[in-house]
Image (cartoon, rainbow, N blue to C red):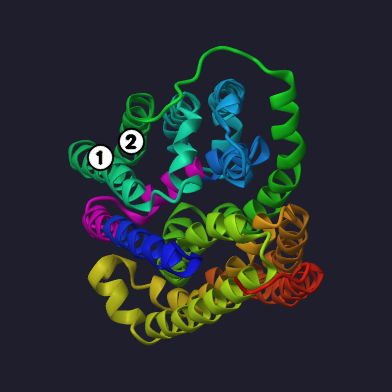
Amino acid sequence: MGYLKTAITGISWAVAQRWTVRGLTVIRLAVLARILSPAQFGVFSVATLVLGFLETFTETSINVFLVQEKAEVDHFINTAWIISLLRGILISLLIFFTAGPVSDFFRSPESFQILQLMALVPLIRGLINPSVAKLQKNLLFKNEFAYKSVLFFIDALVSISLSVITKSASGLVSGMLASAVLEVILSFYLFHPRPHFIWDKSAAAAIFSRGKWVTAAGIFNYFYQNADNLVVGRMLGEASLGIYGSAYKLSSLPVSEVSDVVSRVTFPVYVRISENSHRLKDAFLRSSLVICGFTATFGLLIYIFADPIVRIILGSNWLAAIPLLRILSVYGIVKSITNTIYPLFLATQHQEYVTHVNLASCLGLGITIIPFVSKWGMAGAGYAAIIGAFVSVPLALYFAGVIIKSLPETSAG
């Protein structure tokens, strides 16, 4: 099967998966926005910010490593699982014992118990069989569609059901817990080999050696993706964080629904054709043009229809999100450009380029976020996010050009 047919098939299943998940997300958000207040969403956002922070700083990039490897990866599974398990225990303990200081930092006493409940999520996730990465590595996008859709359905079902009962953000965390438990069970039942407590020092060294740049990139990307949330939560409070976070998620649709979907498919495809420079260049240029066209259209529609989108999905209590959604729709379009280029970096094992681009985004946001929020409130956070996205684009394009020029000439076959 040629790379184009493989990519089209993969993208079709990836889009089906994403839209199934997104449909459930919209339904869940529409229901929960009428049950929970913006402040309660803000409490949940505090917990997810802490979880994301610790997951990013302890990232080992195991999945990226397993997909990048062109040879068989079964001998890495045992060591990868032990690393994931130890990481999960560490993150769980850190969340549990820092719940007090974190809730004090955000002036959010309600987040204390939610944080302690959230501490169970990484502990359970650490048990997941790393062989799950074979879905993406082996281009089994149809199987991945079914697998991920079931997990998210359980998350949505439990979140809505328990939020209706408890009227608390704990329902949202419980949905994450239910999904994590199910994924552990399915990962051991469906995927082989199943891991055992066998440590391979050389395998661990290979994973950590290649993963260091992805980890660094993840750290910078975390701050770029979340520094505005941290500042809004600290300076403007829980309710503002809940409103801003919801607008941010809606505005990111061009990124999550187009560029992320295609990038998930193009990464393993690029790996397979990376030794054929002609095919790799052609695939990269074609996919980039298609993604940019779709994301620009998608982002423009969000900008134009921001008012009805907020009223229909979130309801009348969330009207303050309308101007934010318009501002952040521009961010979504620009951010999708760099996201389109990342698979090329990873497929050619230039993880350091991802790090440099994310650092540029982080600096652009970091320099402007506090003065902008001080002057324009939540809108200022949106403006800072746009600046961060813009400053990274020239650098990403430059690195993409370096890679393409450095590829050895091969035949078009």
Magenta-colored stretch includes residue 176: no
Residue position for label 1 = 154
Q: Residue shown at 23%/72% (left/top)?
A: 312
Q: Residues within 10 Å of mark 2 (few under 14, many from 20)?
A: many
Kindly report the secondary structure that dominates the magenta region of the rendered protein.
Answer: helix
Residue 215, percent across and down?
69, 44
- Camera-nearest residue between 112 and 25: 25
Residue 188, percent across and down?
38, 24
Q: Quadrant of the C terminus?
A: bottom right
Q: Is residue 316 above or below residue 73?
A: below
Q: Are marks 1 and 2 in contact (CB under 8 Å)?
A: yes
Marks 1 and 2, how far apart in space?
6 Å
Residue position for label 2 = 179
Q: Residues within 10 Å of mark 1 (few under 14, many from 20)?
A: some
Magenta-colored stretch includes residue 38: yes
Q: Is residue 208 left or right of residue 103?
A: right
- Camera-nearest residue between 403 and 25: 403
Residue 3, percent across and down?
50, 65
In the image, the segment drawn in magenta is 23-48
Amino acid carrying mark 2 in the image: Ser
Q: Is residue 247 visible?
A: no
